[in-house]
Amino acid sequence: MRSDHPLARDPATAADTPERSPPRIHGPFARGWQLFATALSFGVFGLGGLCFAVFVAPLLKLTCGPARRRRLAQRIIHHSLRVFVALMCRLGLISYRIVGLEALRLPGQVIIANHPSLIDVVFLISFLPEADCVVKHELLRNPFTRGALRTAGYLSNRSSEALLKHGVARLRAGHSIIVFPEGTRSSDSQPLHFQRGYANLALYAEAPVRPVEIRCTPTALTKGAPWYRIPPQRIDFFFRVRPAIASTTFRGNLARATAARRLTRHLESCYQRWLADGTRTTPSPPGNDAARR
Amino acid sequence: MQTRQDIFDHLRDVVVELFEVEPEAVRPEARLYEDLDIDSIDAADLMVSLRKYTGRKIYPEDFKSVRTVGDVVEAVHSLLQP
């Protein structure tokens, strides 16, 4: 069934293909297993973060300079999260599909995505061998994530000045940067609203913006929900990499601030249109979608 | 020597031009972030423009407690006092 899939040979996409609707998990035993497996996954994640901080970060600090250290740390995080995603798939907790992986991996892009779940960024990093991320400042303080995120040189969302300065330099050096322009996880009750840091970043660096559409079925791991309040079924993720937008076409003779607003309005309306297309919440059958990428 | 009204008029023109805000929305009591959607990057651009307008050096500290359009006018006005 997977043989005709154009991306089947890429290990990062070789997750089990979701069926039409995720299988429900029945019975107290199965539910217990799901909760156990979820707790196990969170535990593995936290332990991995701590191990990085205790063993990997000091080793990298001793052996290489800042730029190389960042690159190596990002690669290690990428591979660790690939294993982590594979683990969650094997445990039957999640499944995922991605359409357009090659385009996502092009250099020097500002990669943006909507943010339905806690683990969106885990997937995006698992797709990208080297990428910078803009992360919430608290994660740079959290003991489980601090070591890895700081060593990888991920950018804090706290100071827009520092973000622009470092972000533009990374983009010009050919690195891509992942940003969730909503600034926090998406809310079903609120209309989608983007902040404009990513747009200013792209306009400054004259870098393309690469939108990724993320769907998570059923809704799970949303903002404010505790980890154990997961729906009693497998969570299916779908990632569609959309065509890049040249930020320069929005610039023209406009001031950057003005262009950032127009670019953002355009992308907000794109996302509203993509996500409103509710008939294809879990796109299927798999073959057709992949062919359309 | 610019009056408060001069400063306000200039500020309104800049905000309307750069940030595509409706002119009627630019009132002294309008809050920059909540009402006019001016974020920290915009604020930096605004300072550059005010620096050109006043011909003075402007330090971010002078604008730390600025929340509304009226606050900006007041801060610029006090900067221009001899």
Image (tube, coloured by chain):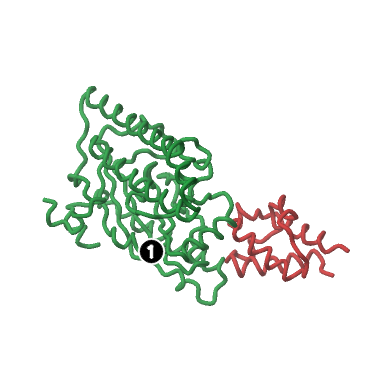
Please tell me whether mark 1 sits on a helix, a strand or a loop.
loop
Indicate the position of residue A79 as horizontal and vertical percent values. Answer: 33, 47
> Which residue is depicted at the point 33% across and 41% down?
A219
Indicate the position of residue A287 as horizontal and vertical percent values. Answer: 16, 56
Q: Which of the 4 image quarters holds residue A130?
A: bottom left
> Which residue is depicted at the point 17% across and 44% down?
A19
Indicate the position of residue A25 as horizontal and vertical percent values. Answer: 22, 31
Left or right side of A62 for A116? left
Chain ID for red: B
Q: Which of the 4 image quarters holds residue A213?
A: bottom left
Chain A appears in which tint? green
Which amino acid lies under the numbered mark 1 shown in the image of this protein?
Answer: Pro
Q: Which residue is mark 1?
A: A107
Residue toward you, A67 or A184: A67
Which quadrant, please, contains the C terminus of chain A? bottom left
Please give the count of numbered marks on the rendered protein.
Answer: 1
> Which residue is depicted at the point 60% across and 52% down?
B34
* Outermost top residue: A28
Q: Is residue A246 above or below residue A187?
A: below
Q: Residues within 10 Å of mark 1 (few under 14, many from 20)?
A: some
Q: Is residue A40 above or below residue A192?
A: above
Residue toward you, A114 or A190: A114
Left or right side of A238 for B36? right
Indicate the position of residue B18 as horizontal and vertical percent values. Answer: 60, 68
Residue toward you, A112 or A270: A112
> Which residue is depicted at the point 28% across and 50% down?
A238
Left or right side of A244 for A281? left
